[in-house]
Amino acid sequence: MARRRTLNERRLTKRQVEELIASGARPCPDMAAALHGSSPQSRVYELPGERFLFVFGELSGLGGKGDVYAADVFHRFLRWCARVEEDIKHGRQGSSRHWAYYSPLKDRLISNIDTLVAELRSRMSQTADVLDFSYGSLDVVSEYVEHIGGERATLELYDHLVAYVGEVLRPRIDGRWDVSRDHEHPYPYLVGAKYDPVMPINVVWHEISGYAPANFRTNAANEVRRKRKPPSSVADVAASVRAAAPKGVLGTLPADAYEVTKRWADGRPWFVVFKEDIEVAGVPCRRGEAWFSREGGLIGATLSREWQFGTRWFGADSFFRYYRGQEDGRLNDVKLGADQEVDGLPCLGGTLVWFHSNQRVSSLHLAADRDIDGIPCASGEELHWALNFHKNGRLAVAVLAREHVLAGRTFPRGTRVSFDEQGYVVGAAPS
């Protein structure tokens, strides 16, 4: 559902802007005034063909340059700007604060799940066969929210949407509802043994408060993907099974070279601990824990020395995990043993670098602030500071390292911003 935000392929130069204005553009001072709080000195003009010209103010660093928007997109942009300003004014920054401000039920939501889902089906005039808790049903939810508007959905259906999205996600993580009470405003979330806390509130907040058209399906799937724990932190579900002989690559290693600590349900070795540094199918593995598939293929291990995967090198003590096994060759993620560059970016040792299936970077933590795609991105170890990227390599999510102008608005340092695949802003959450 992503689409271009501007009609121009490249930002208009000052000369192009002046030519458009001279051709009969009509000034819109009321619209410009609505943006002055976040984009001082900006100007807005109405153009023929239901279009609007936005001209950056001199204080933005892009003074005199501009973009052309379709009328419906520009009006959406204005409404989004107004919502962001109001959220800042009322302390509604971030998903849990925003939800808590509007939620009638607060932490009582999880005891009213069935009622909320039934009410949502009734409001949408849809049966359980349509709103069936599938990912596909979230497209129907997206269309409905687009129809009534994010503002109305926020006021009337926030709890209903959180409940429904949560019920879509719950079976996918084999999870249960719980309430976090470690914050000023308790909020519901999902607990799953193989996942970090999964937040339906994040999904709903992003889709009803962002700039882009609602896309609950994509954001829900991304929430699950981001929160999945690496196998090392998953409980041993195959304890007390009868041991079975190793197969594949593991079966070629000396039996006294490792100790099995976890097994698959069929008894094959899953987690092993190497007693010394060892090569496994040519890969130099450090003494310590490694993971294998039921077929005995290497899943993950710690490098004993620098090693190359595809076009990338990773240093000693980095723990790697394959996407679909060593034969496939693609990486799923790497926990860096020390600070190093990945695709030209300085990455923080001890943090995870995740990869898309096409092997472009999906997520990483910067070791130092860095401008990426023209965005000043902040560094840090905590998950909040992680940079996310789309499959095409464009920046998807970042926290601003300094004050910066985006889509004609000035955002402060610490704002968490989201972009679509073309690089256009789709959401912002000042912290």
Image (cartoon, grey):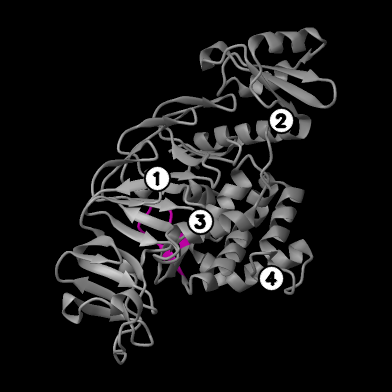
x then y, percent, for residue 306: 25, 50
Q: Nearer the viewer, mark 4 or mark 2?
A: 2
* Residue 110 can be seen, yes or no: yes
- Give the camera-side residue of 151 and 366: 366
263 lies left or right of 68: left
For the residues labelled 4 and 2, the Cα–Cα distance comes to 35 Å
For the residues labelled 4 and 1, the Cα–Cα distance comes to 37 Å
Q: Give the residue type at disc 4.
A: Ala
SS for callout 4: helix
Q: Give the residue type at disc 2.
A: Phe
185 lies left or right of 66: left
What residue sits 43% from the left and 70% below the top? 192
Please say whether residue 184 is one of the residues in the magenta stretch.
yes
What residue sits 58% from the left and 60% below the top? 162
Q: Which residues are magenta?
A: 177-188
SS for callout 3: loop
What residue sits 67% from the left and 34% below the top? 5
x then y, percent, for residue 359: 47, 51
Whether residues under marks 4 and 1 lie with C-beta atoms below 8 angstroms apart, the answer is no
- Return the residue at label 3: 357
- Return the residue at label 1: 386
Q: Nearer the viewer, mark 3 or mark 1?
A: 3
Reading the chain from its start, which is encountered first: label 2 or label 1? 2
- Return the residue at label 4: 118
Q: Give the residue type at disc 3.
A: Ser
